[in-house]
Image: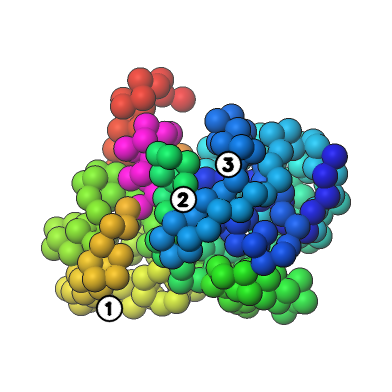
Amino acid sequence: MSECEFAVLGAGAIGSIIGAHLARAGHSVVMLARGARAAYLQEHGITLRGLSEFTIQVPTLTEPRELTRAGTLIVATKTPGTRAALAPLAPLPLQSVLSIQNGPSKDELLTQAFGRERVIGALADTSGELLADGAVLFTRNVNVYVGELDGSDSARVRQLAQALDGAGVRATMSREILTLEWSKFCAWVGLTSLAVTTRALTWRLLSDPDSALLLVRLMRETGALAGRLGIALSDQAILPIATICAGSEQQAVALIMRTGADYRLSAAAHRMSALQDVEAGRPLEVNETLGYACDKAREQQLELPLLATFHALIAAIDRTRRGAAAS
């Protein structure tokens, strides 16, 4: 049995970064993990390298039902299997729950499991990589945005942002969290699609003119879906998506390539998490992200041909490299 201020579901790179920083700052934290990763944490604790360098022991549970109470649940697992992972946690008396997973479908899953009143919107412009020796390389610490889904102000969101930021993971409250989530998703769809298909470091796929052109067109298709759903876009999340979607294609490509030059200087080793998954032989988040966008487009009777093509291609890459059957 365990109680805590923060429970972190998923002890991969981002979950470990957040859990370790909150614990080091004096907050009571429980990690929810399984298998070899849970065993590693129980024996060695969380070790961070890169932007932060420390090791800390954080209580780790392998059975979610052992957690009896938590103030805030932070979901940091990969998107496949999220519904099943949330099921045993649904009865918890939580104040708040948020997910830093990729894709807007996460808020829908949290609402179904816990009720909309408990759900806080969130997105992370924060990066890390789980290394072969079990440590986590902390590579990017720009911002974790949190906000109420209805755009209102609230004490719980302010307190959450202050706790994360005070712990060393930069965080900001936003009253436009849906705009930011979808803006990040537009960027993520393009970056992930090109990372999986080119297997290139992030700065390289941003800097190549053909790759940059495909990125722009994928981002614009996803932006068109957001517009059809009545969601505005912003320049604030990861890439200046509103500008990329509004200007000429030539201007957008030039902007992407300038961003590539910046990444080469500031984050030359950065790899998209999907590329890390490919190289580690892990399943890709294709159906829950690109597939989700394609499903929403069909509901809206919106043709997004490039997105549909990349969804099919990446789904095929995922199945064939793992020898999995089509679902």
State the image coordinates of residue 234 (x, y, percent, origin top left): 45, 76
Position of residue 47 in the picture relative to residue 166 (left or right): left
Query: Would you call the spot at circle 3 few (<14 residues within 10 Å), some (14-19), or many (20 or more)?
Result: some
Q: Residue 268 colored magenta?
A: no
Residue under circle 3?
A: 44
**From what the image shows, is residue 86 above or below residue 29?**
above
State the image coordinates of residue 191 (x, y, percent, origin top left): 32, 56
> Measuring 37% from the left and 32% from the top, which residue is drawn there?
281
Secondary structure mostly seen in magenta is: helix
Residue at mark 3 to residue at mark 2: CA–CA distance? 12 Å
Residue under circle 2?
A: 136
Residue interval drawn in magenta: 272-283
Residue under circle 1?
A: 247
**From what the image shows, is residue 177 above or below residue 87?**
below
* In front of the other: 214 or 248: 214
Q: Which is nearer the N-term, disc 3 or disc 1?
A: 3
Q: Residue 275 colored magenta?
A: yes
> Measuring 67% from the left and 75% from the top, which residue is drawn there?
162
Mark 3 vs mark 1: in front: 3
Residue at mark 3 to residue at mark 1: CA–CA distance? 50 Å
State the image coordinates of residue 38 (x, y, percent, origin top left): 61, 36
Quadrant for residue 65, please give it.
top right
Query: Would you call the spot at circle 2 few (<14 residues within 10 Å), some (14-19), or many (20 or more)?
Result: many
> Measuring 75% from the left and 57% from the top, which residue is drawn there?
28
> Measuring 35% from the left and 20% from the top, which residue is drawn there?
323
Q: Which is nearer the N-term, disc 3 or disc 2?
A: 3
Residue type marked 2: Val
Residue type marked 1: Gly
* In front of the other: 144 or 103: 144
